[in-house]
Image (tube, grey):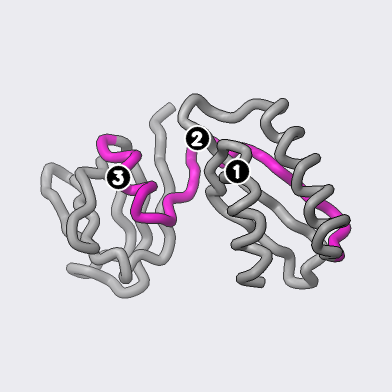
Amino acid sequence: MQDLHALVERSVNGLGYEMVDLEVSSRGKSLRLFIDKPEGVNIDDCVLVSNQLGNLLAVEHDIDYDRLEVSSPGLDRVLKKDADFVRFTGERAQVKLRVPMEGRKNFVGILRGLEQGELSIECDDLVQKIALTNIDKARLAPVF
């Protein structure tokens, strides 16, 4: 599965997009890919990537799947990589921890930066430092 992830990421990056996430169903028959670029993603971007990956996976690498979905990550996109936390500094995010910190597992606040493997997030007028290794899930949390 790691090979599939690397293959898809190389192909997506080669087209000028960022691979945000790749979800593979438990049976491996459905692939869901989330892509992004600084100016945002539209339907034409999704079609382009879908066509490219469809050819790549079916013809060149003979990977068996039933369905390939390509979409934008949405306004509440997941944050996984160090670069995500840096790129979205100043934005509101929700962070769920693996192990509670000060009796809390969930933090919602403004991202204030990433330094030496620790995320700074401002919650309730206090800046919390959270080790990236302790983050279970993180995503943007826009206010509508």
- Mark 3 to mark 1 CA distance (whole Å): 22 Å
Q: Residues within 10 Å of mark 1 (few under 14, many from 20)?
A: few
Give the side of residue 144 with respect to residue 74, left or right.
left
x, y percent for residue 138: 40, 54
Question: What's the distance in space between the residues labelled 3 and 2, CA to CA?
Answer: 17 Å
Q: Which residues are magenta?
A: 64-90
The span from disc 1 to disc 2 (Cα, nearest Å) is: 24 Å
126 to the left or right of 6: left
Specify which label sits upstream in the sequence, 1 or 2: 1
Above or below 112: residue 44: above
Residue at figure coordinates x 71%, y 27% from the top left: 43
- Residue at 56% in and 48% down: 19
**Mark number displayed over residue 75:** 2
Name the mark nearer the viewer: 3 or 2. Answer: 3
Q: Which numbered disc, 1 or 2, marks the residue closer to the eye? A: 1
Q: Is residue 131 magenta?
A: no
Q: Earlier in the sequence, mark 3 or mark 1?
A: 1
What residue is rendered at 65% in x and 59% in y? 7
- Which secondary structure lies at badge 3? helix
Amino acid at circle 2: Leu
